[in-house]
Amino acid sequence: MSPDQKLVIVSFALMTMENIKKALSTALIILLVIMWVYSGISKYQEFERFGIELNRSPYLHQMSKSISYLLPLGELVLACLLIPARTRLVGLYLSLLLMVFFTAYIYAMLNYSYYISCGCMGLFEKLSWEAHLSLNVIVCILCILAILLHRSVLPSTTLHYEKAK
């Protein structure tokens, strides 16, 4: 096999790996957009009950009114940040941050609270607290993976275009 043929094979393998990274990154971003839109809309659809559940929380009751308005709006804004390429990385970091807060809240409720109250709506409210904690940890890991993939795909795409000039 000639050196040129080897170069073509290596280039093809690298291009394929880049395509896999891009596809996985896109799939994770779509998953997060769907999750944030569903979560935000579910809270607005059951707004009164959502506010009542927040008010029952031993940790959030003093801020429950503000949170009941801002959290669903914030989740929808996060979904919007994930769509355009130029705001996607910010959206991914903010998604991770919010998921870490949610995970810490659930952990605190499970381990330190005298009363367990959940402001989750829709399908998420059907989960047990332990399952919810596990799901949140998984989503945190997926956010980290999406950030790493997004950061690794963008520079290589930029370098590829610079080399093509």
Image (cartoon, rainbow, N blue to C red):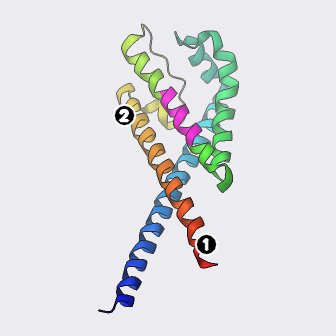
The part of the image, by quadrant, that contains residue 64 is top right
Residue that carries the numbered disc 2 in the rendered image: 134
The residue pinned by badge 1 equals 161
| Residue kind at label 1, given as amino acid type | Tyr
Percent x, y of residue 65: 68, 17
Q: Start and end of the magenta stretch? A: 93-102
**Could you classify mark 1 by the number of other residues whose Cα lies within 10 Å: few (under 14), some (14-19), or many (20 or more)?**
few
Magenta: main secondary structure equals helix
Percent across and percent down for residue 37 are 62, 43
Q: Which mark is residue 12?
A: none
Q: Secondary structure at mark 1?
A: helix
Quick one: 17 or 104, which is closer to the camera?
Answer: 17
> Is 115 contained in the magenta span?
no
Q: Nearer the viewer, residue 110 or 25?
A: 25
In the rendered image, the residue lying farthest to the bottom is 2
Q: Amino acid at mark 2?
A: Ser
Q: Nearer the viewer, residue 100 or 86?
A: 86
Task: Kindly identify the residue that appears in the image at 42 percent across and 17 percent down.
Answer: 108
Does 137 sit above or below residue 28? above
At numbered mark 2, what does the secondary structure look like: helix, strand or loop?
helix
List x then y, in percent, for residue 139: 45, 40
Q: Position of residue 59 (x, y in %)?
A: 53, 12
Residue 34 or residue 98, whichever sits in front: 98
Is 96 magenta? The answer is yes
Residue 165, by quadrant, is: bottom right
